[in-house]
Structures are given as structure tokens and as C-alpha cells.
Image (cartoon, rainbow, N blue to C red):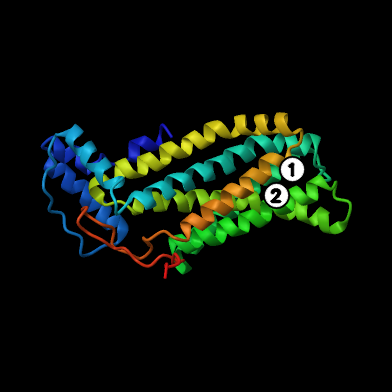
Amino acid sequence: TFLSVAFLNESPSWLASRGREGEAREVLSKMVEMNGSRCAKLEFNAPKKTVYANVQRDLGFIFGPAMLYTTLVSCFTCFCMNVLYYGGLYAFPQVLSEDVATGTSPAFALLIGCFWEAPGYIMALSYDRVMGRRLTLVFNLTALVVCVLAFVHGGSNNQESMVEYVMVRFGYAGYKCLAITLNLVAFTYAAEIYPVSCRVTGSGLSIGVGRIGAVTAPLAYEWTREFSGTWTTFFYILACLVILDATLVAFLPFETRGKVLKESMDDSHETDPLCQPAECT
């Protein structure tokens, strides 16, 4: 990470706010070249230094009528994804060493889990070519519920049959793979839904709420295990969170895949949600 910083470009917005507009245009020119865009304009208005006024404006838009539902769902999705990923990192070493036999040593099972994360990155790139952000989230959240329940069912029944033996391995592999895919798509969507003028504030809010999930996940596992006396309670709670999140995502009004990202708060690219709420008659 330390070495990679040397290859990063400075923020064009930061450069422009300090009167270094020439350097800002150079950075923008590099970004245009990297993205393969031939029609992007390099002209811009230098931002003003009224930081607090800008933050107040950004929050007013992010939590305004047009974006309130999307903001809350984005924050909840990032929260769930962090609980899933970091909760799994904390729970699996204990579950695999004490409660669920995988036929190998717990250390080797965890190593296999790390390898199963690699296809998650490939899947995230593949979905971008064939599926919208919202549909990708709903599809993978649904698949993740199946994986979590399969792992819990097979593991809690001590893999008494070949079906349960397969369910444990299928659930474990799917959990590790899909958790990575969903994290990537969720954070990408959180950045794309906001216009440039408030993208940092909006995406930063979602990421911050997600980190709360990362911090609380280990504590939640310990509390639920102490309270219920079994490891399965934590995973059932995860499944419920994922089901709720998939339902909320289905009603998101904005699709960002293949769209020209909004430059200002006046632009609107609202589309129909995947599911329409029932109308009262």
C-alpha cells in the first residue's frame, strides 16, 4: 500500500480548490485516457472553499426525499456485507475447529476458504457485463441465503448423510465466494448512485456504516453463542439480515450500470425498481 501511493494521482477537485487548475486538468486528462473516453470535457468551475456549507448541502441531498430510501438501503447493504464478511472471518475458525468437521484440519479448511474468495472477484467483473447492479445484488443475496442455510443444516446435523456432507462444503464455498462479490458490488453501487458534487460524502457514509458492521460482527457472534448456546443462531440471524436486504434492494429506484454518472444534483436517472409496491385501491 505504501509503495502504491507513489503511483496515485492527486485529487483534481483538491488541486482546483487551491488554484492549481492546470495540474487538475492534467490529472483529468490521464483519467480520460485510462477510461478510453473521447468525449469527456476537461473544463470545470473551480470549487469554492466553503467546506461546511458544502457538507450541509450534500447531507441535505443525500437524506432528501429523492435519495433517502436509496441512502438508507445502501447503508444497510454495506452494513450487512461487512457483518457477513468479518463475521465469517471470526466465526469460521471456531466453528470449523469445534463444531463442524470438514474431513481436513481447521487450518486447511480456512486456507481453502481463502482460495474460494478468488472466484468472487471474477464473478463481480462478469456480472458487470450481463446484469444491472440491483439485479446482481438481489441474485447474489438470494444465493447467499441458500449457502448459509445449507452450511448450517449440514453442519448442525453432523453430516450424517452424503447430502449433508455436500451441503457443508457447498455452503462454505458459496459463503466465502459470494461475500466478496457482494462487497464489491455494494460499494461500487454506493459510489455510483450519488452525483459528483456529493459522491465522497454519500459513499463515505455507506462505507462508514459498513465498518460499524465489521466492528460489531465478532461481538454479535459471541453474544448470540453465549445466549443461545449454539453457533447456528448467529448464522440464522445472518440469513434473516440477507433476506431483508434482498427485499429492500428489489425496490431501489436507481440503476447505475451503463449509465452516465450524474454530475450534479439536478440530474436524475431514476428508473423503475425491480419490484413495484402494491397500490391501494
Give the quadrant of residue 216: top right
Left or right: residue 239 compared with residue 190: right
Circle 2 sits on which residue?
A: 172
**Residue 25 rendering spot, x and y as whole percentages:** 16, 48
Left or right: residue 10 compared with residue 184: left
Instruction: Give the vertical position of 175 relative to 270 (above or below).
Output: above
**Residue 192 rendering spot, x and y as whole percentages:** 35, 53
Residue at the spot x=50%, y=48% of the render?
Answer: 183
Residue at mark 1 to residue at mark 2: CA–CA distance? 9 Å
**What secondary structure is marked by label 2?**
helix
Classed neighbour count for the residue bearing mark 1: other residues with Cα under 10 Å, few (<14), some (14–19), many (≥20): many
Classed neighbour count for the residue bearing mark 2: other residues with Cα under 10 Å, few (<14), some (14–19), many (≥20): many
**Residue 153 rendering spot, x and y as whole percentages:** 77, 51
Residue 232 or 47: which is nearer the viewer?
232
Give the quadrant of residue 87: top right
Left or right: residue 89 compared with residue 103: left
Residue 117 or 32: which is nearer the viewer?
117
Give the quadrant of residue 255: bottom left
- Image quarter (top left, top right, bottom left or bottom right) of the C terminus: bottom left
State the count of labels.
2
Circle 1 sits on which residue?
A: 109
Instruction: Give the vertical position of 262 relative to 6 (above or below).
Output: below
The numbered mark at residue 134 is none
Residue at the spot x=80%, y=34% of the render?
Answer: 98
- Image quarter (top left, top right, bottom left or bottom right) of the N terminus: top left
Q: Residue furthest right?
A: 160
**What secondary structure is marked by label 1?**
helix
Mark 1 belongs to which amino acid?
Ala
Verify CB contact (< 8 Å) between mark 1 and mark 2. yes
Q: Earlier in the sequence, mark 1 or mark 2?
A: 1
Mark 2 belongs to which amino acid?
Tyr
